[in-house]
Amino acid sequence: MSETNRQRFGGLEGYEIYRVEKSNAQGVVTSVSFEVQTPEGEFLDRFRSIEQAMRLVKSLAGVPLEADDYDY
């Protein structure tokens, strides 16, 4: 039986990024993705890289993309 492990990875202005790992019956991680949620807890999108997820969160929060003040 496969298992899904979701952990908060970061966030900004109420938007949250979660690291989601899926593993097989032997406990081997088979996929990793990063999910973005709204301040209300609604799912927005899923990405393969943290950079893509951060870009979306910064855009939604109104932070210039070149700014490096991301909260992990």
Image: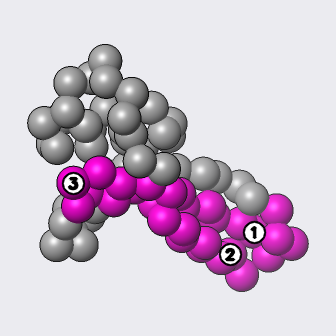
How far from the left and from the top, in percent, is residue 52?
A: 39, 33
Label 3: element kind: loop
Residue found 16% across the figure and 43% down from its top: 61
Q: Mark 3 points at which residue?
A: 13
Span highlighted in magenta in the image? 1-28
Give the side of residue 8 with respect to residue 40, left or right: right
Q: Nearer the viewer, mark 3 or mark 2?
A: 3
Q: Mark 2 points at which residue?
A: 2
Q: Residues within 10 Å of mark 2 (few under 14, many from 20)?
A: few
Residue found 63% across the figure and 64% down from its top: 22
Please say if the residues under marks 1 and 2 sit with CB atoms less than 8 Å apart.
yes
Q: What residue type is labelled 1?
A: Asn
> Which one is nearer the viewer's eye here, 51 or 29?
51
Residue found 24% across the figure and 72% down from its top: 41
Where 53 sits versus 16, above or below? above
Residue closest to the far right: 26
Label 2: element kind: loop
Q: Name the residue under label 1.
A: 24
